[in-house]
Image (spheres, rainbow, N blue to C red):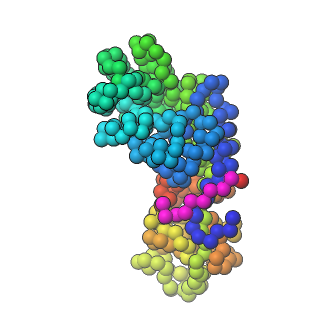
Amino acid sequence: MSTRETVLEINLAHLTHNYEYLKSKLNPGVKLLAVVKAAGYGSDAAVIAKHLERLNVDYFAVAYAPEGIALREAGIQKPILVFHPQTVNFLSLIKYRLEPSMYSMRVLKEFISIAESLDQDRYPVHLKFNTGLNRIGFSKDEVDQCISMLNNTNAIMVQSLFSHLAASEDHTEKKFTLKQINAFKRITDNFTDQLGYKPIVHQCNTSGILNYPEAHIDMVRTGIGLYGFGNEAIYDKELKPIASLKSIISQIHVLSAGETVGYNRAFTATAETRTATIPIGHADGIGRHYGHKKGFVMINHKKAYILGNVCMDMIMVDITEIECKEGDEVILFDSDVTAAFVAEHAGTISYELITGIAPRVKRVFVDK
């Protein structure tokens, strides 16, 4: 596709490949939950979810209730887990048949109260346990209290028990990860023995899927693996990045020695320098930390470093050694020069880069 404006191109064929590849790594009978939070990791959650629903994914997950509501309004039918529900959204959660994660006694008590007031019968909830990430989740010492509360109501039922691995991508942290896996097994065995029925049990994220097949249990969760940001050092090289950020050269300037570029005259040419202006800036998700040659774009297969400060709507790059003209395509990241590579060069991570691409950047979907 010839680029005539700044676009985020989403390759659905790569999404299909990643889904099928990860499915092939699962033990027989293990379900797959697709995480589509943060606008499908910066793409479009509804389009991604519809595509995955056609591929027969088992579950979806989002971070917050409004994300799940948007999926329901877009027509998504599969069950949706909400990782971090806020109590103010509990009525909406039930209205849209979203399945909340219970992660503290406060949250569990309040949801039971709301569910009972609405005469709910065995409304599905998910209980999250903290096994070492120390972010949110019940502790192992709260199992008995949870069981007591569940036995005193018919308003909710436990759809799943889950935890989150903290460092499953890091092979030097194998001892810690195995400690988490074993701690979670003790929790779930104790919980299930007292509960009287068996919920779905899940703990593996993408790197857990690939590195700890013994911990697949009943279901696995993957977000970043589906989108593939080129994190080859962490994930499998078979995973293909689905997103490419492209733009064009709007204008070319030739600077003499001593002339400056951009706000605060942050770059000064020491010799004759050719610059290109690209219509994308920090309002589009290219943060100021990419300026001062910490970030770059690709023009005709060559790196063009960002000069001076990133502007709100534009960046200026050095094209002194690059043959190019106004209207030529500019690649900010794609399958070859990945978001992970570009982000690491600027001292950040691909997740921040990709999820920060602003809504005003046009999303274009291809299947090739």
Residue stretch rendered in magenta on the structure: 359-367
In this view, the residue farthest toward the right is 368
Vertical relation: 289 (above or below) 220: below
x, y percent for residue 209 = 59, 33
x, y percent for residue 40 = 52, 48
Determine if residue 273 is in view.
no
Going by the image, does 3 lie left or right of 315? right
Nearer to me, 264 or 57 = 57
Say whether residue 365 is magenta: yes
The residue that appears at 47% across and 57% down in the rendered structure is: 356
Say whether residue 216 is magenta: no
Quadrant of the frame with the N terminus: bottom right
Vertical relation: 332 (above or below) 73: below
The residue that appears at 56% across and 59% down in the rendered structure is: 363
Q: How many marks?
A: 0
Vertical relation: 223 (above or below) 262: above
The residue that appears at 38% across and 24% down in the rendered structure is: 121
In this view, the residue farthest toward the bottom is 256
Determine if residue 12 is in view.
yes
Nearer to me, 232 or 143 = 143
Nearer to me, 323 or 360 = 360
Going by the image, does 338 lie left or right of 187? right
Q: Quadrant of residue 247?
A: bottom right
The residue that appears at 55% across and 63% down in the rendered structure is: 362
Going by the image, does 170 lie left or right of 367? left
Q: Quadrant of residue 99?
A: top left
Q: Quadrant of residue 91?
A: top left
x, y percent for residue 30 = 60, 26
x, y percent for residue 222 = 56, 38
